[in-house]
Image (cartoon, helix red, strand yellow):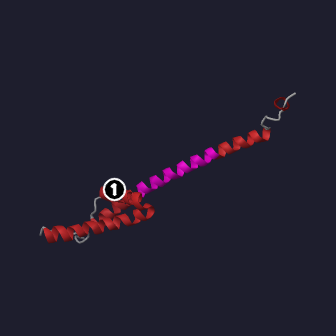
Amino acid sequence: MDDFERGAYSISHFTRRAMIFIGLASLVAVLLYFAAQLLDVLLLVFAGALVAVSIDGMVRLPPAYTVVVQLAGAAVAGVAGVILSTPLAVVAVVAVQMLYVEDVLGDDVEVLGQGK
């Protein structure tokens, strides 16, 4: 009788159960990871839309512009980019309005936030 027939090369019952448990645990971990990533993206989109609508009332910045700026900020600098992107976008728009449109072109323009 050789080693294979005696069971020396067979997988024990405990080893089979451990392999199944590890496989299922790995599958659950992967599913939880993707669920967390999906939730993160959804929260970023909905929070960005909420900020876009609220910032529209304060400085009349178009909501679509705000969402695009926040997504670009998130791509560049993550959470800090999302937080800083809208104020930096407002500063850029006001600078263009005041330095270029009013000073260079000489046109009168209502600067963001001054009309309220």
Q: Which residue is mark 1?
A: 68
Q: Is residue 42 in the magenta section?
A: yes
In which quadrant of the rendered view does residue 49 lie?
A: bottom left
- Residue 9 or residue 90, whichever sits in front: 9
Which image quarter is the C terminus in?
Answer: bottom left
- Residue 89 or residue 4, whichever sits in front: 4
List x then y, in percent, for residue 27. 61, 44
- Residue 44: tell me if it is visible: yes
- Which residue is the extreme one toward the right? 1
List x then y, in percent, for residue 103. 15, 72
Q: What's the magenta region?
A: 26-47
- Residue 110: tell me if it is visible: no
Relative horizontal placement of residue 12, taking residue 43 as reference (left or right): right
Residue displayed at 35% across by 57% down: 67
Relative horizontal placement of residue 30, taking residue 98 as reference (left or right): right
Amino acid type, residue under disc 1 in the picture: Val
- Residue 115 or residue 19, whichever sits in front: 19
- Which residue is the extreme one toward the top? 1
Residue displayed at 41% across by 55% down: 46
Helix, strand or loop at mark 1: helix
